[in-house]
Image: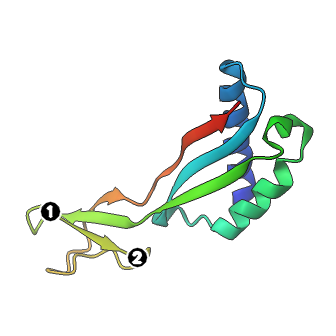
Amino acid sequence: MHEMGITQGILAASVDAVKGEGGTRINEIRISVGEMTEVVEDALQFAFEALRAEPDYAMAAGAVLLVTHVPASSACPTCDGEVFEHGRFDGQCPKCGNPFVEPRSGHELRIDSIDFD
């Protein structure tokens, strides 16, 4: 369950950022998670619920975690860079079948915003 470590990183970065701005309480953390990261949202939410109760993350005790899913997409160099969406295991160009495509999205794992007081 790599979501526990990922969530620790999200909380630690959020707490540091909010402390740096003089905040005292985190209300909401918005993140983007790409299809290709293999992060399971239920596991992420479970880890968030468990970790936000830890003393190191006390300012996030009442916070919510909102996740935006980013679909995987790639561009095919054979088909003039045409971008297409695909799943984790079917990344070849649907027009020409080229398996050597250029990833465009789906590898994101970032904090988009933090709402705090």
Most extreme residue toward the left, as rendered? 80
Residue at the far front in the pictured view:
117
Q: Which residue is mark 1?
A: 77
Label 2 Cα crowd, 10 Å radius (few <14 / some 14-19 / many 20+)? few
Q: Please, what is the three-letter code of the amino acid marked with disc 2?
A: Gly
Q: Amino acid at mark 1?
A: Pro
State the image coordinates of residue 29 (x, y, percent, origin top left): 64, 45
Q: Quadrant of the C terminus?
A: top right
Figure quadrant of the N terminus: bottom right
Residue appearing at x 45%, y 56% in the figure: 107
For the point 11% across and 67% down, which residue is it?
78
Question: Is 86 rendered above or below residue 15?
Answer: below
Q: Is residue 106 left or right of residue 117?
A: left
The residue at 58%/58% (across/down) is 67
Mark 1 Cα shell of 10 Å, populated few (<14), some (14-19), many (≥20): some
Residue 16 placed where, x, y %? 70, 27
Name the residue that disc number 2 marks: 87
The image's colour scheme reads rainbow
| Above or below for 77 versus 58 | below
Distance of mark 2 from mark 1, alpha carbons?
19 Å
Q: Position of residue 44 (x, y in %)?
A: 69, 61
Could you say where residue 86 lies in the image, as x and y percent from the top left? 34, 74
